[in-house]
Image (cartoon, rainbow, N blue to C red):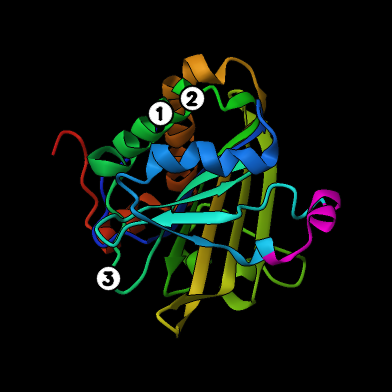
Amino acid sequence: MQKIPIKLEPTPIVSAVVEIKFISSVPGEAVFGIIYPLLSKEYKKFKKLPVLQIPNDIRDRDPSLIFAPHYEFYDESKSLKILVGPKVIAIAFHKTEHNEYPGWTEYIEEEILGIYSKIFESALIDRVTRFAIRYTDFFGSNIFENTEYKVSSKEEENLGLNEKIQFSRNFQESGFYHNIVISNNSAFKVNNKQLKGSIVDIDTYMESVENFEDDYKKILNECHLLNKNKFFNILKEEYVNKEFNAKYQDT
């Protein structure tokens, strides 16, 4: 069984989003008013997002907009932003030139638990319809050279080494769904600078989550661990150790 590192240096993580989609106990237009005093002491600034320029009746009918966030809470001193809509709350990290991934156990987990505690005390959420953790990792090289996956055909033994490939899987395991996309023809933008390379994108989620309010700490930890395990099961262990100076629990 492959050992799972506790830290990579440098980290390839460029995005991490923890998202709740929900049915609220109040009208949609009242959600922001409830959320604002819960977040504004620590996330002192907010901005309206472009979706608010779309008329309400169109937003309510368009499936792609129903769960769109309307506001972004942020603070220059924090690595995370909070996206809020009538049916969604997402806590997000995105890499920039001055914003490196702060670590799950070092920062993100505790921050999320504090935010969730406030939200559930407010009785805003009636039912969670989807809970997800999504990580995106960027690599400057062809990642198929260093994965345990092999994509082949009659003409080519390993297509991933010589062609532009996008590979996707969606499956259920351990009570969660996993949507995995691996692409060796991707780009990532940092401060208007376009970087070309490979992406590993893993979305681990549950739908129609029962008793989330009571079990969110357990579900959060389990979802994160499964997402992390899926990532390291994709990559060759020797590649991880060599390129990212992997740190393990007992070292």
Q: Which amino acid, by three-letter code, is at mark 2?
A: Ser
1 vs 166, left or right, is left
Residue 251 x %, y %: 13, 39
Residue bearing mark 3: 98
Identify the mark at residue 118; answer none if there is no mark.
1
Work out whether residue 158 or residue 82 is closer to the camera in this orientation and state it.
82
Q: How crowded is the residue under tag 1: few (<14 C-alpha within 10 Å), some, or many (20+)?
A: some
Q: Is residue 218 above or below residue 135?
A: above
Residue 156 x %, y %: 69, 71
114 vs 198, left or right, is left
Q: CA distance from mark 2 to mark 3?
A: 34 Å
Asked if labels 2 and 1 touch by Cβ distance under 8 angstroms, the answer is yes
Residue bearing mark 2: 122
Say if the magenta span includes residue 30: no
Q: Is residue 140 visible?
A: yes
Q: Is residue 3 visible?
A: no
Q: Is residue 226 above or below residue 212?
A: below
Q: Which amino acid, by three-letter code, is at mark 3?
A: His
What are the residue bounds of the magenta stretch? 53-62
Residue at 55% in and 20% down: 212
Q: Secondary structure at mark 1?
A: helix
Q: CA distance from mark 1 to mark 3?
A: 29 Å
Q: How crowded is the residue under tag 3: few (<14 C-alpha within 10 Å), some, or many (20+)?
A: few
Asked if labels 3 and 1 touch by Cβ distance under 8 angstroms, the answer is no
Q: Earlier in the sequence, mark 2 or mark 3?
A: 3
Q: Which-is-in-front pick, marks 1 and 3?
A: 1
> If the image is split into quadrants, where does the N terminus sit?
top left
